[in-house]
Amino acid sequence: MKKDIVYKLIIGLLLGINLLQMGTFMFNPKPPQQDKFQDLAIEILNLTAAQQQTFLDFAHEHRNKMVNLYKKESRLVTQYFETPSDTLLSTISKIEMEKIQATEQHFLDIKSMLDTNQVSEFARFKKEALNSILEKNSASGPPRD
């Protein structure tokens, strides 16, 4: 009889420890992850430590600008579908153009900080960056019937 109680206590203790471990993993927030493309870009361009900081500053500035443009565009698109107008549609198109121009300027800013031996890898970087951008934009997939 005493063995049964000891076994039950051990099983209960192990089960409790197991549940505690699972709860810890499930309810703890994930640590923030740096954009994986930033690491790839730093590698492709073979940036120095100082260039990496400049690159990350450029990326942060560009991201903030794009977030603001996306927010503005989202409000206008919602407004357009409530009350369609050519003026709203034109404004939405201008924002899309601003996003493209801001991204091109971002590329030019990055290129301007490169040394002559790093510029040769810039075309590869730009191609990879555009692929990354387009993949993120199409992550939701095409519209469904």
Image (spheres, grey):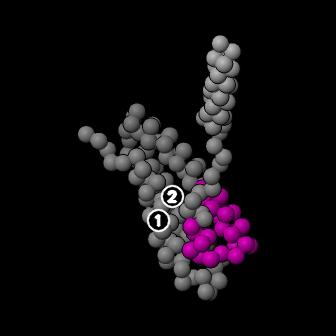
Q: Residue at x 65, y 12 (%)?
A: 1
- Regarding residue 87, the answer to whether it shows in the image is no
Q: Which element type, helix, strand or loop, lies under badge 1?
A: helix
Between 62 and 53, the residue placed more toward the observer is 53
Q: Nearer the viewer, mark 1 or mark 2?
A: 1
Above or below residue 86? Residue 133 is below
How many other residues sit within 10 Å of disc 2, few (<14), some (14-19) or many (≥20)?
some
Segment tinted magenta in the rendering: 40-63
Res 130 label: 1
Above or below residue 27? Residue 34 is below
The residue lying furthest to the top in this view is 1
Q: Quadrant of residue 111?
A: bottom right
Give the amino acid type for the residue marked by disc 1 in the picture: Leu
Point out the image quarter for the C terminus.
Answer: top left
Q: Quadrant of residue 22?
A: top right
Residue 82's spot in the image, x, y percent?
A: 40, 33
Where is mark 2, residue-wise? 99
| Residue 88 shown in magenta | no
- Residue 94 left/right relative to 20: left
Residue 100's spot in the image, x, y percent?
A: 48, 62
Between 91 and 23, the residue placed more toward the observer is 23
Res 12 label: none
The residue lying furthest to the left in this view is 145
Q: Residue at x 49, y 46 (%)?
A: 73
| Residue 55 shown in magenta | yes
Residue 32's spot in the image, x, y percent?
A: 65, 48
Q: Residue at x 41, y 39 (%)?
A: 80
